[in-house]
């Protein structure tokens, strides 16, 4: 059974800088620019992304 999806950045316990770096790297490597595509790529809900 998978754990529940986080509902906020605070629940993920990642710093804003770390999340920013993950998002930018994902956007660059996968060539995505829509939030829904980024969220799918990093397996997080859109509100968290």
Image (tube, rainbow, N blue to C red):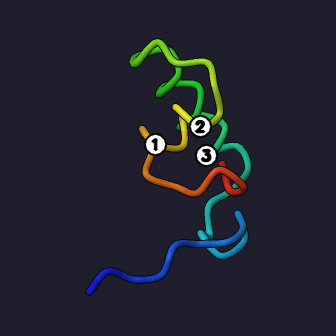
Disc 1/disc 2 C-alpha distance (Å)? 6 Å
Earlier in the chain: of badge 2 and badge 3, it is 3
Q: Position of residue 49 (x, y in %)?
A: 65, 47
Q: Position of residue 19 (x, y in %)?
A: 62, 46
Above or below for 34 versus 49 = above
How many numbered marks are there?
A: 3
Residue that mark 1 sits on = 40
Residue 42 location, quadrant: top left
For the residue carrying disc 2, how many other residues have a C-alpha within 10 Å: few (<14), some (14-19), or many (20+)? some
For the residue carrying disc 3, how many other residues have a C-alpha within 10 Å: few (<14), some (14-19), or many (20+)? few
Above or below for 48 versus 10 = above
Residue 18 is labelled as 3
For the residue carrying disc 1, how many other residues have a C-alpha within 10 Å: few (<14), some (14-19), or many (20+)? few
Task: Please say if the residues under marks 1 and 2 sit with CB atoms less than 8 Å apart.
Answer: yes
Q: Position of residue 23 (x, y in %)?
A: 58, 34
Q: Looking at this rendering, what residue extends furthest in the left direction?
A: 1
Residue that mark 2 sits on = 36
Under circle 3, the secondary element is helix
Residue 10 is labelled as none
């Amino acid at each position: 059974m998978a754990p529940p999806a986080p509902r906020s950045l605070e629940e993920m316990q990642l710093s804003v800088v770390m999340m920013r770096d993950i998002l930018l790297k994902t956007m660059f490597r996968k060539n995505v620019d829509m939030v829904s595509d980024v969220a799918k790529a990093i397996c997080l809900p859109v509100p968290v992304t």
